[in-house]
Image (tube, helix red, strand yellow):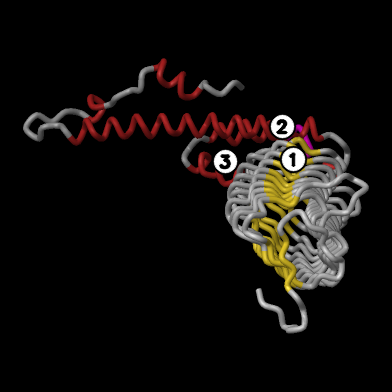
Amino acid sequence: MSSNNTSDKVFQYTGSETVPKDVTIVHFHPSVVGIEDVAYDQPSAFQHCVELKELVLNEGLRTIGKSAFAFCKSLERITISSTVTDIGNCAFYNCKSLKEVVLNEGLEKIGKQAFEECRSLESIILPSTVTDIGNATFYNCSGLKEVVLNEGLVSVGKYTFQHCLSLESITLPSTVTNIDENAFYDCKSLKKIVLNEGLKKIGYNAFGGCESLESITLPSSLVEIGKYGFNMCINLREVVCSGGLAKIEHSTFPNNCSTLERITFPSLSSRLDSIIRAGQLHAQNKVQQCINRGEIEWERGGTISIPVEVTRRGIWKELKQRIDLIIKWIKYYEMKEATTIFELALWKVKFDQVDEADPRDRDACRVDVPGPVKDAIIQYIEL
């Protein structure tokens, strides 16, 4: 980096000297390997250097300690050296002018509140080497518009993107298994959320207050959504379940999600329709028995769905049992149809091998899959 002000003097930091609080430009000496943590009641080397505008970190630097550059309100951009593996808690806390942060591959840990209150920050790309984001890492980064999360990330911590008012879309990579409580709370502009297969849990109030969100698709891998997971999503119209019904608290979609009408299961519906059209008519009867017990809606050719007013009665356990039973019947008849197709394939192969000079009846070419094999295929599902 270069300074626009020729009167500014470069301060060479070697890791041991006291840093003047009015410093404007800092270059790290190549020998510096870390900015060490300090006692809770002691300021770090660069904390409250409110005039610091330019910071050049050396290659070879490995760690940036707690509160290292907290309250450096004039700092506008920073490139983290490729050798840095750990950014400590509150490292850049309340750097109000910080617009640009470049994080390189090799970074492994970003501590709690590391970039909290960096309200000028507009975009951030997390390298694939970061496996989890600490609590409140980007809390109240109100100017943050773009976030790129790479494969390798496993969890999004508590309050990580809370109050990121400008964030419009987010895609969670398939490696993410957990979104913790309040992770995206009050992201008022967040309109598009992509949750990939692999996600298992959405925590308490994780997407609460996402007022621009209109639709959400839940992956089949999801097993739990905490209370108020989508609280105050006042424009949410549609919830699509890719698989079954996760463990969902009755308050996941509370009454303040007033535009939401129903939860739908389009993938289950298309699978059911396919096996019925293939001739497995008993599947329709079995599923209809589950439907006739109430609360779940379905007509042949239509979509299996649950009206939201039903979900608010607090009978999720009963609803989940019925949806799980529907899934099992669908799997059963899919496998039954598969064994029929297998038998037909074997029959056709044998029939095609018949010598024209010695024709045989088609029935003589029929090949039945042995009963034990059928049982092993069809009855592997416990009904």
Tell me how many marks there are.
3
Q: Is residue 212 above or below residue 363?
A: below
- Residue at the spot 79% in from the left edge and 38% down from the top edge: 248
- Locate the C terminus by quadrant: top right
Magenta highlight range: 292-296
Q: Which residue is mark 2?
A: 322
For the residues marked 3 and 1, what is the alpha-carbon distance in whole angstroms?
A: 15 Å
Please give the label number shown on residue 272: 3
Amino acid at dot 1 = Ile
Pick out the residue farthest to the right. Answer: 41
Where is residue 201? Give x, y as percent: 73, 40
> Do the residues bearing badges 2 and 1 touch, measured as CB atoms within 8 Å?
yes
Where is residue 363? Give x, y as percent: 26, 27
Q: Is there any visible trace of residue 135 in the rendered image?
A: yes
Q: Which residue is mark 1?
A: 296
- Label 1 packing within 10 angstroms: few (<14), some (14-19), many (20+): some
